[in-house]
Image: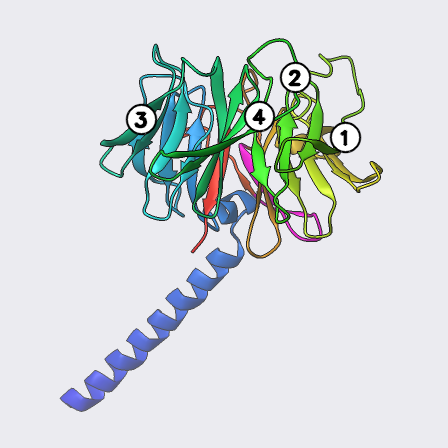
Amino acid sequence: MSHSTSRRKFLKSAGIAAFAIMLSGAALAEDKTPAEKNAEHPYELMVCDYVGGKLCRVDKRGKITWEHRPEGRVWDFVLTDDDNVIYPMRTNKMEVRCVDSEEDVIWSWPYASEFKEVVNITQHQSQLILSGQMPPQAVLMKLDGTIQRRVPIPATYKTFHGQLGNVYALSDNHFLAQLWGEGTALEVDENGREVWRFQVPKEGTGRYPAGTVQDVLRLDNGNTLIACGTQARLLEVDPSGRIVWKFTASDHPDLNFTNACGLQKLKDGSLLVTNFLRGSTGRGAHAFILSKEKKITWTLTDHKTITAASQVWAIEP
């Protein structure tokens, strides 16, 4: 047999083998279970694991690429464009701290002389908004820690922890605030005067109204989306106060939807919802995405990496 004939036979057999492997790989891809398909995240994530006591960055494969364990309790954070992380922290000084990717402290603001507590932090463009409690104030701050101004928020809850939660800047120089203790979403003008208010109605036998609002989001249609905390539901409310849509734990038992505590509107119009599993760990989703049609398209269920996440944030390009 000539070398050329032998080579042709070898190439033919190798080609058949390669084709068979390709078909086998395609079949395996098609045979993946929903859990296997869900293993790859659609976004890189930043996670605050409140119970695990850490902030971590997770790549699309679910691998932790950065981890930071502050010496105090952390609930919330902001990730800046230059990869600094800013978070309020409960320490002896009670402080808001900014660290870089090497975990070096860039700046720190000790606030104990001014507020009983700062639990939440949000970002609007190049500005931070911190939620001061006792007195209830939105503290507007530059990314370098310089305070610009303060907006009083008419919260009436008597206990400092939970008096005021997330505060967001709206396009008309108004602010949308989460009043944890009052179970209320509140809009105020630039001087802190009330413009709009909605108190989540009582449901079930749990504690009320405290804990029934953990986050708020003003939607493009003018409605307000409310993460109803321990009621484990989402409500969309129109300006008149009418509930036009809701999402409940009982409708989605596989999620183990325990505490609706975080909302993020993604660039494609979908919503990332954080489910705080404190006291109910080891089962269900730490977070999930709802499409514009409000269908579940992805869940985060990594119980090896995360214990109970108080904030899951998608890092979009």
Going from N to C along the chain, the mark reached first, 2 or 1, is 2
What's the amino acid at mark 3? Ser
Image marks 4 and 2: residues in contact by CB distance under 8 Å: no
Q: Residues within 10 Å of mark 2 (few under 14, many from 20)?
A: many
What's the amino acid at mark 2? Gly
Q: Is residue 61 left or right of residue 175?
A: left
| Spatial separation of the CA atoms under disc 2 and disc 1 | 13 Å
Q: Position of residue 268 (x, y in %)?
A: 58, 57
Image marks 3 and 2: residues in contact by CB distance under 8 Å: no
Image marks 1 and 4: residues in contact by CB distance under 8 Å: no
Q: Which mark is residue 181?
A: 2
Q: Is residue 84 left or right of residue 43?
A: left
Going from N to C along the chain, the mark reached first, 1 or 4, is 4
Q: Which mark is residue 165?
A: 4
Image marks 2 and 1: residues in contact by CB distance under 8 Å: no
Q: Position of residue 98 (x, y in %)?
A: 32, 32
Image marks 3 and 1: residues in contact by CB distance under 8 Å: no
Q: Who is closer to the viewer here, 51 or 189?
A: 189
| Spatial separation of the CA atoms under disc 3 and disc 1 | 35 Å
Q: Position of residue 78 (x, y in %)?
A: 43, 37
Going from N to C along the chain, the mark reached first, 3 or 1, is 3
Q: Residues within 10 Å of mark 1 (few under 14, many from 20)?
A: some
Q: Which residue is mark 1?
A: 198
Going from N to C along the chain, the mark reached first, 4 or 3, is 3
Look at the image and give the residue range highlighted in magenta: 286-298
Q: Residues within 10 Å of mark 3 (few under 14, many from 20)?
A: some
| Spatial separation of the CA atoms under disc 4 and disc 3 | 21 Å
What's the amino acid at mark 4? Gly
Image marks 4 and 3: residues in contact by CB distance under 8 Å: no
Q: Which residue is mark 3?
A: 108
